[in-house]
Amino acid sequence: MHKYKYLLPVIFLMFTAFKPDKPAYLLFDKDGKTVKYERMLKQIQEADVVLFGELHDNPISHWLQLELTKDMFEMYGKNLILGAEMFESDNQVILDEYLSGKISQRNFEDEMKLWPNYKTDYKPLVEFAKDSGLYFVATNVPRRYAALVNKKGFEGLEELSDEAKTFLPSLPPAYDSTLNCYASMMTMEGMGSHVSSNFPKAQAIKDATMSHFILKNREPGKKLLHYHGAYHSQNFESIYWYLKHYQPELKIVTIHSVTQKDISKLSEENTGKADFTICVDEDMTRTR
């Protein structure tokens, strides 16, 4: 026994030199305080709409989206409605046909304008909706119309047919160029000095369209959970601003996603961007 008495302190020091717990993420509230997942679920009970801002290539964001969807389904059953930026409004019929079993998965995936990371990140949400009988709203503007706005401004949309306009919000859409989410796009690094004033409007038509279809499909007594890139709801702007513009009384909970080198404390620049912020280790693998 005596020959091991000097080895035991060394072993102890080896184990204490490593952190006993290394979480992949922490959840923070609007004030930058760590909170438990259950706290977020409790606050969601008071909301009409939940805006989940993801990092498109972050597996923790996508995993938590699925987990939250499952938990909200446990709480609300078919009173839960899903919606996503990743599906464009002119593809709603195809999405409806797949969820109702009228077309095959192969036809669905061949004909939808799916993102490159659909199979790893969004397919689980669609399949859960299909298996659970949930309605899923394709909320985003058709990309060709965002390109049209970038070229001609909102006025370009007025030239479209009545049928085309069914995929859009009422025209012209409300627009506040002073919102940071749009004003900052005019000075974003890498955009160059020749960015036209239509550039942020192309972003705004996405936000306006998503909010339009959220409101169109939201029903009293039901919850709508919407998935989108974090930029589309951070700082309580973008989609959030449009929802409040048209329905000020709407109760909304926002979820934001960020990465940091050290996740033990939310950085000052990441604090206050949403009701809840998912902070993920920046070394986390990416899905595309």
Image (spheres, grey):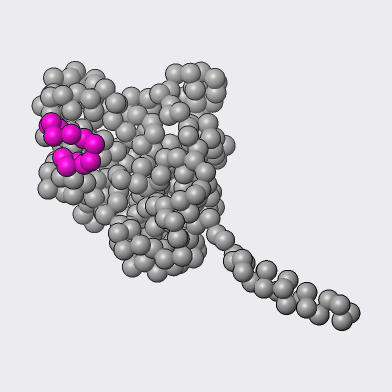
286 over 259 or under it: above or below: above
Instruction: Looking at the picture, tell me which residue is in the foreground, 76 or 207.
Output: 207
Name the residue at 12% across, 24% down.
152
Would you identify the image quadrant in which residue 169 lies?
top left
Q: Tell whether 74 sits left or right of 41.
A: right
Instruction: Looking at the picture, tell me which residue is in the foreground, 200 or 128.
Output: 200
Q: Tell whether 263 sits left or right of 151.
A: right
Q: Tell whether 190 sits left or right of 53.
A: left
Asked if residue 55 shows in the view, the reply is yes
> x, y percentage for residue 195?
15, 32
> x, y percentage for residue 104?
55, 21
**Main SS of the magenta segment?**
loop
What is the number of callouts on the image?
Answer: 0
Name the residue at 51% across, 48% down.
284
Name the residue at 42% across, 52% down.
259
| Image quarter in which the N terminus is found | bottom right
263 over 66 or under it: above or below: below
Look at the image and say whether residue 138 sits in the magenta stretch. Answer: no
Name the residue at 33% across, 29% down.
89
Residues drawn in magenta: 185-196
Q: Tell whether 87 sits left or right of 126.
A: left
Asked if residue 95 shows in the view, the reply is no
161 over 193 or under it: above or below: above
> x, y percentage for residue 158?
13, 24
